[in-house]
Image (spheres, rainbow, N blue to C red):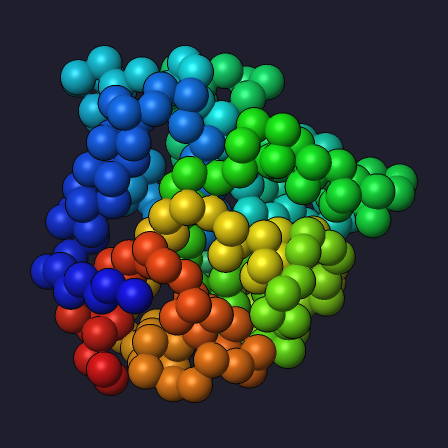
Amino acid sequence: MEVVILPGNRQIGKLAADAVEALLRRKPNAVLGLATGSSPLPVYDELAVRHERDGLDFSAAHAFALDEYVGLVPGHPESYREVIGREFTSRVNILPENVHTPDGSAADIPAECRAYEDRMRAVGGVDLQILGVGTDGHIGFNEPGSSLASRTRIKTLIEQTRRDNARFFTSLADVPHHVVTQGLGTILEARHVVLIATGAQKAPAVRDFVEGPVSAVCPASVLQFHPHASILVDEAAASSL
Ligand code: GLP
């Protein structure tokens, strides 16, 4: 694990965008793994700028979202399919058919989870996975207690995560209880993982997953096993290291 402490969001966005840009220039049909949440927004903003300004080309790239809520009506503004589109994919020239999100409204969720992994495998797996981290150490929606070898599956959100995410909904009651998420085993297969954490509220989680034991109690700690994990943090998120 390589931990890089940077002054703020702009520098984090630029460094992560450098990794994406280098990948796309080397491999135009690269497979990007996308996270939602506020942490990756500086990266998406910077990539959108580089697309507009420098012609950074996403036309042959693929993208796979980490997770999706279960039970939101298709097109719900807070469904991760919509969020990813709004915040990133609609701002670059990636083809809509190459942007994949798990279908949280599928009638047969376990079959959808298997099909999602098949779709990832069919394009050669994720080259670069962008991640945030929850205040409880979750990545994707792999809450504490998730198997370190887990695959894409349905999970129940813990109350802390529902409360953290309630800011995106009208009320806490509107936050779904269930989600589909890539598993920790799935995420570990990405060839390069770039995790972004900013702000003092992330400091305990960052300390636990970087310096604590590898444990399902802190799901992000599984990244200690990853051969190429870059952890980009600001000084506040690094303050307990
Ligand atoms: C959600 C997402 C995660 C994300 C986390 C942190 O739970 N499923 O992928 O990392 O939020 O969000 P934020 O970056 O807004 O703190």
Q: Position of residue 130 (x, y in %)?
A: 39, 47
Residues 144 and 179: in front is: 144
Against 215, residue 23 (above or below) is: above
The reply to whether residue 78 is visible in this rendering is no
Residue at 24% across, 84% down: 240
Residue 24 image-quadrant placement: top left
Against 79, residue 196 (above or below) is: below
Residue at 21% across, 24% down: 50
Residues 78 and 103: in front is: 103
**Which quadrant is the C terminus positioned in?**
bottom left
Is 135 left or right of 166, judged from the image as shown?
A: left
Q: Position of residue 80 (x, y in %)?
A: 58, 42
Q: Position of residue 66 (x, y in %)?
A: 55, 47
Residue at 43% across, 16% down: 60
Against 11, residue 214 (above or below) is: below
Find the residue positioned furthest to the right. Answer: 107
Against 207, residue 92 (above or below) is: above
Is 226 left or right of 101, judged from the image as shown?
A: left
Residue at 56% across, 27% down: 123
Q: How many marks?
A: 0
**Which quadrant is the N terminus positioned in?**
bottom left
Is 126 left or right of 48, judged from the image as shown?
A: right
Q: Position of residue 211 (x, y in %)?
A: 32, 82
Residues 131 and 174: in front is: 131
Find the residue positioned furthest to the left. Answer: 7
The reply to whether residue 129 is visible in this rendering is yes
